[in-house]
Amino acid sequence: MASQTEALSTGVTHKSTAVYRIKSGLTEGMKYGVLIFFSLFFILPWVWMLSTSLKNPQELVLWPPIWIPDPIRWDNYAQAFKQAALGRYIINTLSIALPSVAGAVVSNALVAYGFSRVKWPGRDAVFGIVLATLILPGFVTFIPLYIIFSRLHWINTYLPLIVPVFLANPFYIFLLRQFFMGLPVELSDAARVDGASELETFWKIILPLAKPALAVVALFQFIGSWNDYFGPLIYINDTELFTVTLGIANMRGTYGFMNYAWIMAATVITVLPIVILFFFAQRTFIEGIALTGIKG
Amino acid sequence: MALSSLKLTREDRRGLVTGLLFISPWIIGFLAFRVVPFVMSFYYSFTFYPILESPKWIGLANYRNLLSDGRFMSALYNTAYYAFFAVPLGALIGIFLAMLLNLKVRGLSIFRTIYFLPSITPVVATALVWLWMFNPRGGIINYILSLVGIRGPGWLGSPLWSKPALIIMSLWGVGGAVVIYLAALQDVPREMIEASQLDGANTWRQIWNVTLPMISPIILFNVIIGLIGAFQFFTEVHVMTGGSGSPADSTLMMSIYLWQSAFQFFKMGYASAQAWVLFLIIIVFTVIMFRVSGRAVYYGGR
């Protein structure tokens, strides 16, 4: 019986090998064809951004458009810093992003620990509430929040952008909880036998092991703060205090289309830290994205 | 639950105190920045509240006015239009690209980088670049279309083409979903695929009967998150139109009109009513998605 099926299957493969090879060659080619087609779609805006950032005003509206400006105007980058105070915007944004990263890591680690490695009655029900708040749209709460923050005289300060980050975020809680639950229970038991308090166990045993997951939170929070537009738009009116995103969006209104090369130069500078960060922390990114998306 | 909480053991009680202490940052944030504003916004939605005066109770008037507000109706329509196309297209292309990458592909990490990077660039930057790409004068998109003999439309200057332009732009950010779907596909057990191949399933049957059901919970999760995001689509439009929703209100999204009502017209009560309509729409769609998908989604053996 076994040899019969074996003979049958080898016979089949033998006959169709040639056909199969042509077919697989074609599908292979199509596969890469489609992948490359989409790659061009994804790459095009980067090329266009760089190209535009180096053009002079006349070249901006040339038809057909040119890819490589002649001469290449590096001066647009200097102008981006001069015309739009880009340097100040960067410092402003960092002074929001860096405290936010610290706040997100500490607060979410604590909360996730409480939801995963401490046993208490009602824990999973409360965690259900955490998850439910994931779908609560920010647009429902932003008007009262604006009113609360203005009563506190926090408008035109960075506090509305930083303080809430120190009070945990359902997405990060979920991510870290997932990671903490994967660590063996024996670790905590051993620490308890040694007389360690819960806080010591958290600090000395669990946190060091959770570094990869904490790195994901730090990375996402940095990018979240760097990229944020709605928060600064609502809470910051003073141009001195603008963040990069607010600053470059504002350039559009100020300079219009004739100076779009400056705007593109400023955009390149805004995007650059994110791109660099990605290449340094590529694995953390991919794993983090998969971790948040997949276990939902 | 009320009964059992009366008879907590000493260990339970100690655990409860420790647990609550650990989650206290979340409790404070939840109460101060979610529950309180949530209740306040519900209350404001029944008031006349020009920001400098205190809110005055006017019952259902805001909601009644919304029904006869043409701009609000446009905003509803534009948001629905955008979500109806952007979310399914994003899911389809995301799954398709992830499936391609899941076949043995040389240079996988290069493709993945190319696809993924746009999804983490600041939305403001994306909007500014695409604004210039869509420009009918000297923009690259109409140039490429002209190479294949198509006279490109006015895109963001045309009430007819402004929303399609936004949808095309949204697809540039599909890479985050690609990475999630790819990770899900890599988790599908090899034996299941091999078993279906032994049963003589062709590639399409295999995708339809094995692969898609296996990753269906992740698809559902992503589509719901995508839908919630689409209903709150804001930054791109705000940057590209300076917050106006032009031309002819054709890109006036619910979120944009809400922002205008609150921060340009200072009608906090009216804006809060809009926020609640938006919230209810999101809830209804989330519930529908879960209900409809109840049968289609496969949760490992349950």
Image (cartoon, coloured by chain):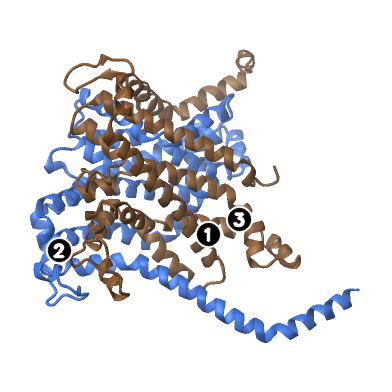
Chain colours: A blue, B brown
Q: Position of residue A242 (x, y in %)?
A: 17, 44
Res B294 → quadrant = top right
Res A82 → quadrant = bottom left
Residue type, label 2: Ala
Query: Do the residues at pointers 1 and 3 share their chain?
Result: yes
Q: How far apart are marks 1 and 3 (CA)?
A: 12 Å
- At mark 1, the secondary structure is helix
Name the residue carrying label 2. Answer: A261
Tag 1 subunit:
B
Residue type, label 3: Leu
Q: Where is residue A152 in the image (x, y as percent from the top left)?
A: 22, 24
- At mark 2, the secondary structure is helix
Q: Residue B182 carries which label?
A: 1
Name the residue carrying label 3. Answer: B212
- At mark 3, the secondary structure is helix
Residue A271 makes an appearance in the image: yes
